[in-house]
């Protein structure tokens, strides 16, 4: 069963849903077989886990381009997604 979580980061509310366990582990294995591409990893996590705002689901990392604290916000969201599996 997929888990859901609502978090607030830097004044913005994000609704999250865990990706499927198979999808998450397959993606992690793919990245661990070579060098990890942090941009690609975070983009996949955002597109497959953020349910609101909808723009993030379709745009991934691109949604944050040019915004203040972009890296810190993306990292915080990805950490929150990873915590759903723990």
Image (cartoon, helix red, strand yellow):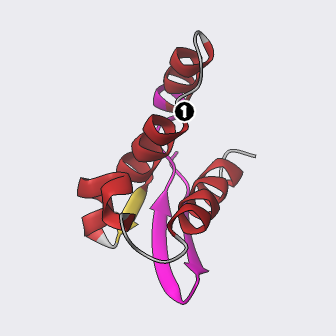
Residue at 51% across, 16% down: 30
Q: Is residue 73 above or below residue 23?
A: below
* Picture coordinates of residue 68, whole percent (x, y): 49, 77
* Picture coordinates of residue 76, whole percent (x, y): 63, 63
- Comparing 52 with 41, the one in front is 41
Magenta stretch bounds: 1-23
Q: Secondary structure at mark 1?
A: helix
The quadrant in which residue 50 appears is bottom left
* Picture coordinates of residue 23, whole percent (x, y): 46, 29
Q: Is residue 5 above or below residue 37?
A: below
Q: Residues within 10 Å of mark 1 (few under 14, many from 20)?
A: few
Residue at 36% across, 63% down: 65
State left or right for residue 72 relative to residue 22. Answer: right
- Comparing 51 with 34, the one in front is 34
State left or right for residue 70 relative to residue 47. Answer: right
- Give the total number of marks visible in the rendering: 1
Residue at 55% across, 55% down: 3
Residue 14 is a magenta residue: yes
Residue lying furthest bottom? 11
Write down the residue under mark 1.
21
């Amino acid at each position: 069963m997929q888990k859901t979580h609502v978090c607030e980061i830097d004044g913005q509310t994000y609704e999250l849903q865990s990706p499927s366990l198979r999808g998450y582990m397959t993606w992690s294995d793919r990245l661990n077989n070579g060098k990890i591409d942090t941009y690609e990893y975070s983009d996949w996590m955002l597109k497959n886990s953020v349910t609101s705002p909808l723009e993030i689901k379709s745009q991934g990392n691109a949604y944050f381009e040019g915004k203040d604290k972009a890296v810190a916000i993306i990292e915080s969201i990805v950490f929150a997604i990873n915590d759903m599996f723990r």
